[in-house]
Image (cartoon, rainbow, N blue to C red):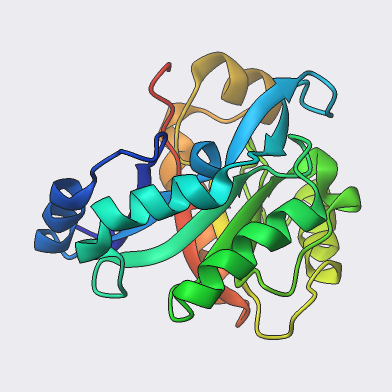
Amino acid sequence: SFSNIADILVVNPNDNIVQRTQTFADLDLKAILHLNELFFELIDNNSPSESNYDLRSDYQERWNEFKIINQAILNTNYIGVFYIGEEPTWNGITFSELDAVAQLLQGEFPNIPTMIIEAYPSLNDLQIPETIDWIGFDRYFVNDPNTDSEFQQDWQTLKTKISNQNQKIMVILDSHYINWAHGDFGNIDLTQMDDVAKNYYQLAKNDKKVIGVLGYFWPNG
């Protein structure tokens, strides 16, 4: 009940998400359209993550097919943001590839923002096209991002990458407790996760550049 935006994954150009998106709207939710697989394809392991993605040669045709099927919901009443690159630099997506997709989307839907979320190890190499509206990064197993020195260094690095003064920041909340990972890497107990959430919320509230907060849950546990 406290959420107003949530993720819908798009994989294939013939995916029909009209009913799911309308269900979102009935719950006062707008959709984040997660479009990485629609535009990009896994090529090899030649990237920092060892999952290297390239822009598909037929990305425009794939988008046009998807757009025709889902035209009823491709507007600001239903869509909150286009998420166009899954940790792009970490996964080998180039600046020009991101820019090509963002320009395509902005040209057709100028009122719907575009977003990228980067993996923290690749922040130093991140280049953000001016056509991207919302930016962020993920770094997990942090109790308090306001005081954690490594998180704060990443936070400041992200801000140096801003290429358009109108760009906003999306905070990625550490919201899915993984027993061994949070215990070993963050010294965080499950009972502390409410405090973790409050700390991320405080980070977001304290910075006028922040547009929102997202928390991810991993279906593989």
Quadrant for the N terminus in the image: bottom left
On screen, residue 2 versus residue 131, left or right, reads: left
Q: Is residue 80 visible?
A: yes
Front residue of 133/108: it is 108
**Residue 38 location in percent, x, y?**
49, 41
On-image quarter of the C terminus: top left
Q: Please tell me which residue lies in front, 87 or 217.
A: 87
Residue at horizontal 54 percent and vertical 42 percent from the top: 36
Residue 197: where, in percent of width, then height?
46, 51
Give how far across and how far down residue 48 sits, in percent: 84, 29
Above or below, 71 against 182 in this view is below
Looking at the image, residue 144 sits to the left or right of residue 127; the answer is left
The vertical placement of 98 against 102, above or below, is above
Can you give x and y, in whole percent of width and height, for residue 9 in the image?
38, 40
Is residue 167 left or right of 211 when viewed as pictured? right
State whether residue 92 is above or below residue 205.
above
Tag count in the figure? 0
Furthest residue in direction right, as rendered: 124
Which quarter of the picture shows residue 89? top right
Residue 169 visible? no
Residue that appears at 39% across and 40% down? 13
What residue is shown at x 54% (from left), y 76% (from top)? 107
**Between 203 and 67, which is closer to the camera in this rendering?**
67
Residue pictured at 62% horizontal, 58% vertical: 101
Judge whether 166 appears above or below 56 on screen.
below
